[in-house]
Image (cartoon, helix red, strand yellow):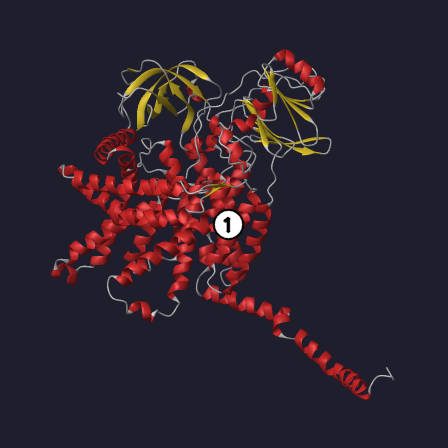
Amino acid sequence: MLSAPPERRRQVAAAVLALPGRAGRLRGLSRSPAWNPAHWRMRLGAMLETEIERRRLFNWLPVPMGVGVILYFLADREPNLLAPLIGFALFAAAALLLRRRRLAMALCVAAAALFAGFAAGTWRTVNVAAPALARIHVGKVTGFVEALEQREKGVRMVLLVTDMPGIEPAQRPRRVRANTSSTTLKPGDHIVATARLLPPPGPARPGGYDFARDAFFRGIGAVGSISGKIALAPAPVAPSRELAWSIAIDQARNALTQRIASIGGGQAGAMAAALVTGKRGLIGEPTNDDLRAAGIYHIVSISGLHMVLAAGTIFWLARALLALSQSVALVWPVKKLAAVAAMLGATAYCIFSGAEVATVRSLIMTLVMLGAILVDRPALSMRNLALAAIIVLAREPEALLGPSFQMSFGAVAALIAFAERWQERPPDSAAASWPWPLRPLWLSACGILVTTLLATAATAPFGVYHFQTFNPFGLLGNALALPFVSLVVMPAAVFGVLAYPFGLDWPAWALMGWASGLVLKLAHWVAGIERSTVVLPAFDAVALVLFALALLWLTLWSTALRFLAALPLCAGLALASDPSRPDILIERDGSGILVRGPEGRLILAGRPSRFVLTQWLHADGDSRAPDDAALREGAACDARGCVIRLKDGRSVAYTKDRIAIVEDCQRADLVVTPLYASGTCAARLIDRAALVRDGATALGSAAGGWRAFTAEDATRLRPWTRARPVQPAAAPSSTARAPATSAAEPAEEAEPPQ
């Protein structure tokens, strides 16, 4: 250093002398508000105070209520209704007593809402409880035809049972849903027929859609088919007033469905009829596939879009007609009268379209929005959405578990949150100066684009979780189709219904058929684009909860607090990006299995139903069709069964012959058979008795064996779970399976609601 030039020595000395100052600046930086925890606590407290002043905490009230509903469905046995009611009363009283202590009151209100959700689930189950068929029943069944739906092949009907010989009255299902080829039936007929009925099927895979639970809350205790002659029979009792009302509505719906479909023509007419009456049976599966691929399947399921368009059309029409009279417009509250007319029209539309769960939910949301107009409140607000959610959860708590509730409320919450932010922006003076019609066209195009983007982003996690598909061109499909639906199809539907009693409705249905045909052509074109449907693997429910929390946090807060939604969003993405996939999937009756081969692709053995196989493949992120021949590549099969090897070298035997079971038990590591097996087995054995007990089964590789996941937990005793046969004492070997006394074979499949 001493040998360095003098100039260099002066630079080093200056740097050393400057160190204390730099250290001081670093200490000052550490004391900066950006790095001070107390500063952030103060900022968070200030933002929370702002949220309280804006009365945003009410918007969170449905969240603890929903948590209570989820806890009810997680119970392993049916709870006592008195317990949650007592909890609700205690915490509601505590909130009233502690109203001067804000934090304590808020916690008590949240706890009361949680108990209210739990009590709503318990109360709903008590009110809809009805027996479900315990095993296969083939025999006579008599009852009233409560509802009919024409399909491409035959008819699907709901039968209100009056007698079922061979089944005790206390164990007789209240309603059964059956398919038949007869087309001469009509709602209200009391029939006698020979039917093959089965218990409502449980999930096709662990964690999948549970049709049995949905059927329970619809009052359906059996599904199946009717073959042979159907005869009319005298009714043992007169139909109740409720049944007579339901029959009259269904008769009118069927008559209008046939008229619209015949005038509209083909699949366009079937789609137009579905938009008015809710009867979707005439829409073919290829058309449904095109609509799903284009991301516009929601337009044929009567829900929020249709209810808003119908109510909006009636509101505009009533307001315009009232405004024609100067005396009425100056004296009477025209806007409120139009809102009342829209409420009545929306209610009638809901009743006439079948009052399905999604339709009733949409009606409640619409009535709350229109009711806000009557009390001079903003119609579109997060507070009204929260109130609608509370009403829906109190009325139909089971809806929370379905995709329809999650997607509809998620989309509306995102749209309202965006509208709130949009109102805070300064007006665009350039766009305001545009001449007509450029400005309305620009606003309409931007509105469709933005709302579709927001709704797609908000509902994508729920769609992937329930259906394992994502439609990347849904934005294009909605942008092309929604203008026709909003401006032509739904207004024509309203005018057609009003003209129907006068016999002057055919121009409206013809116009609807023309516009629906254009929508179907657009859907077919979008569906033809490569990768219009992307199949993604199913992720865990924990990831879904994180996605839902991120959406709630982002939309329900109005301050910068909402940006903390990035935390659960990133955690959900991390979990969803690496889902756990089972190595073996077994059909609930043992009719087929899927095994992950050495190359990581699933290999098929047996013949499971097409519906179940599609669910399996989609849950694994596999886009192959159920009839793809490549699914069977890698399986060594003969007349008695198949053998498939896993990546780790272990072998799985699928056996259809009793003699082969003995051989496979000595050679394979896992034996799966649709037969009942007794005796010892050196390998792990899953036979018909185990599947009757556990339902569809998935196995993942574990150290020295497999980790099993079952669709039906035998320890869960809920009203919608299957009645399982009593199992005899187990054989001495731990690997043996005792035969069951009876089994419930898979019943008619049903897709989850969309």
Relative to residue 472, is residue 433 drawn left or right?
A: left
- Say if 216 sits above or below 89 in the image: above
User: For this view, does 317 lie left or right of residue 578?
Assistant: left
The image position of residue 135, as x and y in percent, is 49, 19
Toward the viewer: 227 or 263? Answer: 263
Query: In front here: 238 or 429?
Result: 429
Q: Position of residue 660 (x, y in %)?
A: 64, 14
Q: Please tell me whether residue 688 is drawn above or below residue 700 in the rendered image.
A: above
Q: In which quarter of the image is the N terminus?
A: bottom right
The percent coordinates of residue 94 (x first, y second) are: 51, 54
Q: How would you rate the neighbour count of disc 1 (Cα within 10 Å): few for under 14, some for 14-19, many for 20 or more?
A: many
- Classify the position of the C terminus by image quarter: top left
Circle 1 is placed at which residue position? Answer: 548
Which image quarter: residue 490? top left
Left or right: 469 as drawn, with respect to 436? right
Amino acid of disc 1? Ala
439 and 451: which one is in front? 439
Q: Is mark 1 on a helix, strand or loop?
A: helix
> Is residue 527 depicted above or below 629 in this figure?
below
